[in-house]
Amino acid sequence: MWNFPLVPPTASEEGAAISILYWVITALAVIFGSIVLFGAIYLAVRYRADNNAVDRSDAVDTDLRMELAWTVVPLVLALIMFAWAAKLYADIYAPREGYYEVFVIGKQWMWHCQHPNGVRENNMLTLPAGRLVKATIISQDVIHAFSIPAFRVKRDAVPGRYNAMYFTPTKPGEYHLFCTEYCGTKHSEMIGKVIVLPEKEFQAWLEKGGQGLATATTTTGGAAAGGTLTLAQQGEQTFKALGCNACHLNPNSAVKVPDITKTWGSDIPLADGRTVKGDEAYIRESILNPGAKIHKGYQNLMPAYQGQVSEEQLVQLIAYIKSLADSDTGGN
Amino acid sequence: MATATYAGTEKPNYLNWKTSVASWLFTYDHKRLGILYLVSISIFFFIGALAAALIRLELTTPKGDLLTSDVYNKMFTTHGVIMIFLFLIPSIPAVFGNFLLPLMIGARDVAFPRLNLLSWYFFVTGGILVLIALFRGGIDTGWTFYTPYSSSFAKGEVSLAIVGIFLAGFSSIFTGINFLVTIHKMRAPGMTWFRLPLFVWAMYATSLLQVLGTPVVAITLLLVAVERSFRIGIFDPNLGGDPILFQHLFWFYSHPAVYIMILPAMGVVSEVISAFCKRRVFGYHFVAFSSLAIAIIGFLVWGHHMFSTGQSIYAGIVFSFLTWLVAVPSAIKIFNWMATIWKGRVHWDTPMLYALGFMGLFVIGGLTGLHLAALATNIHLTDTYFVVAHFHYVMVGGAIMGYLAALHFWWPKMTGRMYPEGWGKLAAMLVFVGFNLTFFPQFILGYMGMPRRYHSYPEEWAVLNVLSTAGSSVLGLGYLLPVIYLTWSLKYGKVVTERNPWGARGLEWELVDPVPSPHNFERTPIVTRPAYDYAHPEEPTGFIPKPRPVVVGGKDG
Amino acid sequence: MSVQEIEKTATLEHTGDGHYHGDGILGEQFETLEQQNNAYLIGMWAFIVQEVLFFGAIFTAYAIYRFKYVLEFTLAHHELSVPIGTLNTFVLLVSSYTMARAVRAAMQNRHKKQAFYLFLTFLFAGVFMVNKYFEYGAKLEHHLFPGGDYSAHEIVKHAKEKGELRIVEENGREFYELGRTTRDGQFTAFKRVTPEEFEQRTRLFFGFYFVMTGLHGLHVLVGMIVISILIGRALIDHFKNKPVADYMPVEMTGLYWHLVDIVWIFLFPLLYLIGR
C-alpha cells in the first residue's frame, strides 16, 4: 500500500526536457516560498508584542531600494523562466519533419487511433520507441483533450479542426492515456493506454495487423496481416466511393482541376494572392469546403463535402493524397 | 426611540433601532446590506461545500462507486458555479466592502443606497434561480460552460442556471459602480487618495474589474442560452460556429474574475497585518498601486487558459509573457507585508493567524501559478489536479482566509460582541492544517497526470486521494467551528463596550461607536492624519467637528 | 437662487436623533447637492461604460463571423430594409435632440417644457418601436427568424434576381454559387456552398441580427418606461408649482438615451449598410 508513485514516468525526449524545467521552477518556488513562509513566521515570533528585547527603533515604513530589489529580482527571474519555457514549447509544438504520423479522433467517449498502414486501435495507441511521432487530433463532437502524462504532452481535440502534437517516445512500456477536457457523462471513462515498443517489435506488430504485442512473441491472436489495407489504401477506396475520381486523377475529366499528386507538402498559391501550405488542415478544409481556399488559376467548381464525409474518411483521404506525393517522388 | 438594545448599550445602533423584518428587507443601510449578504452567501457556501464533500467522498476510492457519472458531473458543476458566482465573487466586496467602505472614508452611506438594495435582490434572485436549476435535475457543464457541449449537447436546466448567473453578475456590476462612485465622491474632508486605507484601494481595483469584465461574460452566457434555444450556430462547429470563440469571450471575464476574488482579500490582509503589528503598512504606495497593476494586467492574460487549444504559438508566447508579469505585483505585496511585520509589535490573535495563513498559502498558490504560466509545463499540467490545487490554494487558502480574517477582525464592530479567542485560534489552525492536507497531495497527483473532473482514477493514486479526503474533513471542521462559535457569540459572547477593542487605526475604529449608529458618524469627520499612523498614537486619524449652523438651501427660492 | 448657488449651499439638517432631513432633493448620504449630482453623473457614466462592453462583446463576435462568412452575410443582409433602418436612425437622432432639450428644460426648472420634450422623445421612441415591430413581422413572415421554421428561401430568391447567386446541379446534388453578374450578363462565382451551409450561415446572420437589435430594442423599451415616469413627475412638478426639482434623473436618463442612440448608430451601418 505504501508503494505508490509520487512522480510520473518520463518516457519521451520532450518530457525529459519539460521535467527539468518543472523541477527548476519547483526549486525556485520552494526557495521563495520558504523565504516567505519561514521569514514571516520568524518575524512574527521575533517581534511579538511581549518581546521587549528587540530593537524597534527606526522602524521605517518605506524604502525605495528594497522595493526596487524585490520588484526587479522577481521580474528578472520571471523573464528568464518565461523565455526558457517559451523556447522549449516552441521547439516541441512547432511543425517538425521526419515523423511517424498517427491520426487520433476523439468522440464521446472513446479514442480512435489510426496508423498509416491501416491498423486501427480503440483507446490504445501503440508506438515505436526512438522515433518522432506526430499525432494529428480532432474531435467528432465536443471538445476533448488527448493527454499522455508520461510524455508530458497534451492537446485539445477540437471539433472542426486538427491540432497536432509531436513527441519522441523513449522508453518501452505501458502508459496512461486520458481525456482531459470535460466532455460529458463518461469523461472519466475516456481513458486508455499508450504502448511503446522497441522499433523491431513495433514493426512486427504493425505487420501482424496490430494483433498481439510483439513481446508476447510468436503467434497468439490468430489472423495475421495481409488483408488489412493501409490507411492510404483505404483512402483510395474512399476516394473512388465518393466520386472524387470523376475529376481528380482523371485524364478525361471535363473540368480543369489542380494536380493532387503535388498537393501534399507544397506551397499552394491561392486566387486571392495568399500562399498556404498543403498540409492536413488544408486538405481537410478543401474537401469539406473547397470554396474557402481557391487554387490560383482554377475556378471554384468543386462541390463541398461537408456533412458527407466522416472524420475517419477524411483521415484516410489525407493519407491517400500524401501517398500520391510520396510515390510521385519515388520515395516512401 | 427604540431602547431595547442588542449590544447592551443605551444608544440605538444600526441593528436595534428598527427590528421589523421589513426594516431589514427594505433597508438602504450599507451595514445591514452587508449583514444580509453575509447570511445569503453563507447559505450558498454551505451548499457548495456539501457538493465538495460528496466529490471528496467519491474520490476516496479509485472506482466511481458512490455516485453515478452524471450525478458526479453535476456535483462538480454545482460546486464550481455556487462557489465562484454565489460565494467568492460577492464575498468580501458585498459583505465587508458594503459594511466598511463608508465607515473607512467617513461617509454616511455609499453613493447609491437604493442601487445597493437592488444589488442584493438581483443577487438573491439569481442565486435562487441557480438553486432551482440545480434542484430540477442540475447541470453538468462545469462552471466553465465550454461549447459545444454546453450549447448543443448538455441536458438539464442550463439556460435557467445561466439566467441566474446573469442576474448575479449584474449584482456584481451594480456593486462595482456603487463602490467606484463612493470612493471617488464620498470621502470625508482631508481623506485624500493617499490617506485611504489599503482595503479601499483594493476595493477600487476590484470594482474596476467588476464593472469592465462582468458584462462580457453576461453576453457570452446569454449567447450560449440563445444557441441552446435557437441553434444559431455561433459556437457549434456542426452549425458553422467556433467553440474557441466561446473560450476567448468566457475567459476575458473569468480571468479578471479571479482577481475580483483575491484583491479584496489582499486588502483585508493589509488592514489586519497593520493592526496586529501596530505598524503602518510598509511601502503604502507600492501596495496601493500594485492593486491597480494587478487589475490592469489581469485583463490581458486570459489566453493562458487556452494554451492547449491549438492557438498559435505566437499567441501563447504573448499571453505567457503577460502572465509572468502579473505575478510581480503580487510578490511586491507579499514582501511589503513581511516588512510590515518587521519591527512591529505582533499580536497573535485570530485575525493575524488568518492573515499569516493567507501569506503562506497564497504564496504557494501563486508560485505554482508559475508552473502554469510557463508554456512548456502548462501543457502537461493543464486540466489536471495541479490546476485544481493551484486555484484552491489561491481562492481558498487565499481569498477565504482573507474572508475569515475580515470576519473575525470586524466581528466586534459588526455585532458588538467578541468571539471566543481560543476557539478562533483553534479553528484557524484546523483550517490551515486541513487545507494543506487536502490540497497539497493534489499537486503531486496533477504532476502525475490525474485529470480534473474525473470520478475514477488509476489504483496507484488512491493513497494521495485518501489523504486529500482526510484533509477535507479537517478543513470542513475548521469551517464549521466559526459558524458555531460566531453564532454563539451573538448571544453569549463578551459584549464590546469600547470603540476600538483591537487598538487599531482607522476611522471605523477611532470614530465609530462600538456598534455603529445608523448613520455612522455624528457629523462628517475631518481627516488629519495618514492611514495606519501608529507612529503617532497620540494623534487620532481624524475628528468629529463641532456642530455647525444649519443652512437649508432652496426654500427661499 | 441659481442652480449653482443652490448646489453649493443645500445641506442637511441634523436633528441629533440619528436622522437626517434633506430638503427633498438631497440624499441623506450626501453633503451637498453638487456632490450628489456629480456622484450620479459618474455612476451613470460607469454604467454606460459597462453597457459598451456588453454590446462590444457581441459586436466583436459579429465582426469575426462577418469576416469569415462575408458573402453569405452580405446576401442575408439584403433582406434588411434600409429605408426603415434609415428612418429609425433619423427618428432616434431626433429623439436624442428632444431628450437634450428636455434635460435643458429640467435644469431651468421649466417643468411643462420638460414634460413636453420628454413626451416627444417618448413618441419618437414609440415610432422606432413600431417600425421595429413591422420589420420583425416581415422577417417572421419570410421565415427569417432563426427558429424552427427558418428558411433561406427569400434570400436565395432575391440574390438570384440580383445575379448574385446561381443554383447549379452536379451529380444529383444542388449547390449555390455566390458571386456577381457583370453588366453584360457574365456570372463570376466567388464561392460555392451547399444549401445547408448557406442556410446555416444566413441563419447565424439573423441570429446576430435579432440578438443585437433585440437587446437594443429592449434598452429602448426600458428607456421609454423610465421616460414615461419622468413625464409623470415633470407634470406633477408643474402642477404643484414646484420651483426647484431635481433635474439629475432627467440628465441621467438623457445620458442613457444617448447611449442607446449611439449603439444604434453602430448597429445600423454594421448590419444594414456595409456590403451594399
Image: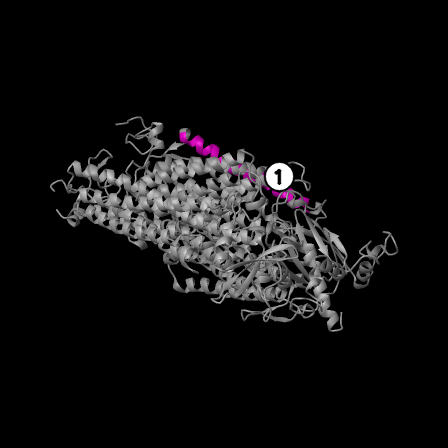
The answer to if B488 sits in the magenta stretch is yes
Q: Vertical placement of B117 versus A236: above or below?
A: above
Q: Measured from the top left, where is residue C165 in percent x and y? A: 52, 58
Q: Determine which residue is flagged by label 1.
A: B70
Image coords of residue A137 (percent x, y): 65, 57
Q: Main secondary structure of the magenta part?
A: helix
Magenta residues (range): B461-490
| Left or right of C45 on screen, residue A101 | right
- Which kind of residue does numbered mark 1 sit on? Asp
Seen in the picture, residue A282 relative to B147 is either above or below; the reply is: below
Residue lying at the far left of the rendered structure = B556
For the question of whether residue A37 can be seen, the reply is no
From the top left corner, tell me how far across and down residue C189 is, in percent: 54, 63
In this view, which residue lies farthest toward the top? B4
Disc 1 element: helix
Residue B485: x, y in percent? 46, 33
